[in-house]
């Protein structure tokens, strides 16, 4: 079984929300998908974009980062 490679991205949307997501698409492919997304959306929301990516067959999910102090 081949290991799936994931990339991690940081998103800022129109509401100035910052989120992170992981996806199996590289930066060039994500950039292409952003342009496609912009054609049909007037407002850019992180969760909507990640769902858009998933609808196109990519593996993607929002992730939450937390700090660990020790």
Image: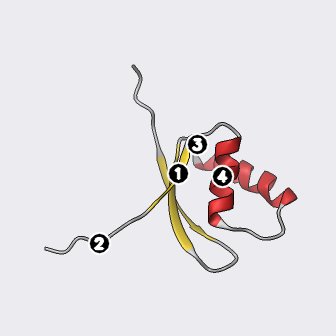
Q: Residue 25 shows which numbered tag?
A: 3
* Front residue of 12 and 47: 47
Instruction: Quickly name the residue at label 1.
Output: 61
Please give the residue where the numbered disc 4 appears in the rendered image: 51
The CA distance from mark 2 to mark 4 is 26 Å
**Residue at the limit of the structure toward the left, as seen here:** 70
Q: Does residue 56 appear left or right of residue 68 in this picture?
A: right
Q: Upstream in the sequence, badge 2 or badge 4?
A: 4
2 or 1: tag closer to the N-terminus:
1
Q: CA distance from mark 4 to mark 3?
A: 14 Å
Disc 2 target residue: 67
The first of marks 1 and 4 along the sequence is 4
Residue sitting at 86 percent across and 58 percent down?
A: 40
The numbered mark, 3 or 2, whose residue comes first in the sequence reads 3
- Marks 3 and 2 sit apart, C-alpha to C-alpha, by 26 Å
Whether residues under marks 2 and 4 lie with C-beta atoms below 8 angstroms apart, the answer is no
How packed is label 4: few (under 14 Cα within 10 Å), some, or many (20 or more)?
Answer: some
Percent coordinates x, y for residue 7 in the rendering:
49, 48
Q: Pick the residue in front: 59 or 7.
A: 59
Query: Left of 4 or right of it: where is 48?
Result: right
Q: What crowding class fits label 3: few (fewer than 14 Cα within 10 Å), some (14-19), or many (20 or more)?
A: some
Query: Which numbered disc, 1 or 3, marks the residue that appears first in the sequence?
Result: 3
Tell whether label 2 touches label 3 (CB within 8 Å): no
Frontmost of labels 2 and 4 is: 4
Q: Is residue 49 left or right of residue 35?
A: left
Q: Nearer the viewer, mark 3 or mark 2?
A: 2
């Amino acid at each position: 079984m081949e290991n799936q490679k994931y990339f991690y991205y940081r998103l800022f949307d129109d509401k100035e929300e910052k989120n992170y997501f992981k996806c199996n698409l590289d930066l060039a492919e994500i950039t292409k998908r952003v342009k496609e997304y912009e054609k049909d959306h007037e407002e850019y929301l992180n969760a909507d974009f990640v769902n858009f990516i998933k609808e196109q067959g990519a593996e993607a999910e929002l992730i939450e980062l937390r700090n660990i102090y020790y």
